[in-house]
Amino acid sequence: MSEAIAKPSTVAPVAADLEIKDAQLIFSAVWSDLVEKHGRDRLRFPREFIWLGGAPGAGKGTNTPFVAEARDITAPPIVISSLLTSPHAVAIKNAGQMVGDREVLGLLLEELLDPKYHDGVIVDGFPRTKPQVECLKLFYHEMLGLHAEYRGTSLAREFRKPMFRIVLLFVSEDVSVQRQLKRGHEIRERNRQTRESGGGELFEERATDLDPQLCRQRYKTFKDTTFDALQSLRQIFHFHFVDAEGPLPEVQQNIIREFAYQSSLELGAEVFDLIQNIPVATQLAMHARQELVGRLEEYEEDSKELFCKVLKFVELKMVPIVRAHAMSGRAQINSEDALLDDPLALRMLIDVLSERGFHATVDIHRVDVPERINPETWEIYCRTKKVYRIDVRYPPSDIRRGH
């Protein structure tokens, strides 16, 4: 057994010394492999990415499902440590070394092509190094390129504009060490009871969870690598810093506050400028959020002139009536505007109101209106008038509810 352990330790430093650290070279090689293997039109990645990092003991595993629920992400998270199961990666990890950036990136991008991540994904443990940070920027740039390349084509919906969010769960060094040691002692005690009972699964007892100095070293590694790497992305992508030191309910409230609805983050700048004059309702409909945002982006890109007309109609003709009925939480609006004869305009109207937190339905009522009479036959000629009945519901005034 001593020989089996010794071999990786003598080989790994050489591999580490030879590893390419130039992010451009790493990414170009991985991206070229993907294009050659799948073809550009099959490089269909998720629209929303949450890149999750956290200090040791910050509770990433505990809070990941809560983050997913907050963002309406149903796909399982991609955990980098679990993803790296290739023989080469295992040998390097067993030697106490970090797996090479090229291998991490290649495995990750290949996994991201799985259709189950189409609407959104949480990636736990990437990026952790400066080359990985630079590769993340290059990946974002390539996704923008694919979005532009396929814009206006039949594949446009497969190459949506990407949304990158950086989420950092943070605890202080003392809290981190305390939680690591607590976890280590709990696992050791559980394993002791399992052995005494004579059956059951034993959990891994990590040395880094039992030695205070190793716990502090692990935290220092986090601060010097992952923390600095993620911090460098603050000015580029949406950045969420979550205080994870308190009790679980408190941490989850912090997560909710960080992900509170913000149109300026979720919509493109041009769309937000067009839509911001329409008020936001108190309660927001979050169902199928990704698809709704995607449609709004498409309206601005593919039918901007019609989109602007719909926005003006909502702002000038509907909002005053909605405001007048704020006490009841319901407004019924009748309109004969020819703009609504366009089915796409109707869809835009409903989506715009949904984006701002309203629930709207439209009913088309047709009425025959006499126009003229044939003097010889006394036949009455009618024209059909279409009346669009728009029912808008939203949270009523708190004053009314209080009574």
Image (tube, rainbow, N blue to C red):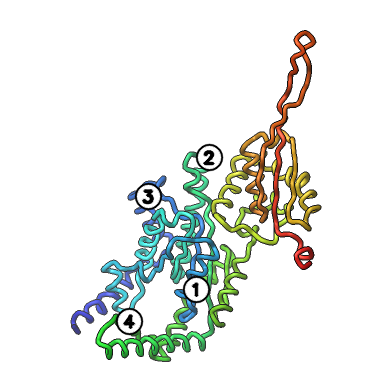
**Label 3 close to label 1 by CB (< 8 Å):** no
Mark 1 and mark 4: span between their CA atoms? 21 Å
Mark 2 and mark 3: span between their CA atoms? 22 Å
Quarter of the picture holding the N terminus: bottom left
* Number of the front mark, 2 or 3: 2
- Label number found at residue 35: 3
Mark 4 and mark 3: span between their CA atoms? 40 Å
- Label number found at residue 7: none
Residue shown at the point (70%, 38%) measured from the top left: 388
- Label number found at residue 152: 2
Mark 3 and mark 1: span between their CA atoms? 35 Å
Residue highlighted by disc 4: 203
**SS under mark 4:** loop
Q: Earlier in the sequence, mark 1 or mark 4?
A: 1
How far across and down, in percent of the image, does residue 377 sit?
75, 10
Q: Inspect the image, locate mark 2, and give the three-letter code of the amino acid beneath it.
A: Gly
**Label 2 close to label 1 by CB (< 8 Å):** no
Mark 2 and mark 1: span between their CA atoms? 39 Å
Q: Is residue 270 visible?
A: no
Q: Is residue 307 above or below residue 208?
A: above
User: Seen in the image, is 202 located left or right of residue 349?
Assistant: left
How far across and down, in percent of the image, does residue 255 sit?
57, 71
Residue highlighted by disc 1: 63
How far across and down, in percent of the image, does residue 257 sit?
62, 70
Q: Earlier in the sequence, mark 4 or mark 3?
A: 3
User: Seen in the image, is 276 located left or right of residue 209?
Assistant: right
Instruction: Count neighbours of disc 2 (C-alpha within 10 A) and say few if under 14, some if 14 to 19, many if 20 or more.
Output: few
67 or 241, nearer to the observer: 67
Q: Is residue 91 above or below residue 143?
A: below
**Label 2 close to label 4 by CB (< 8 Å):** no
Q: Earlier in the sequence, mark 3 or mark 1?
A: 3
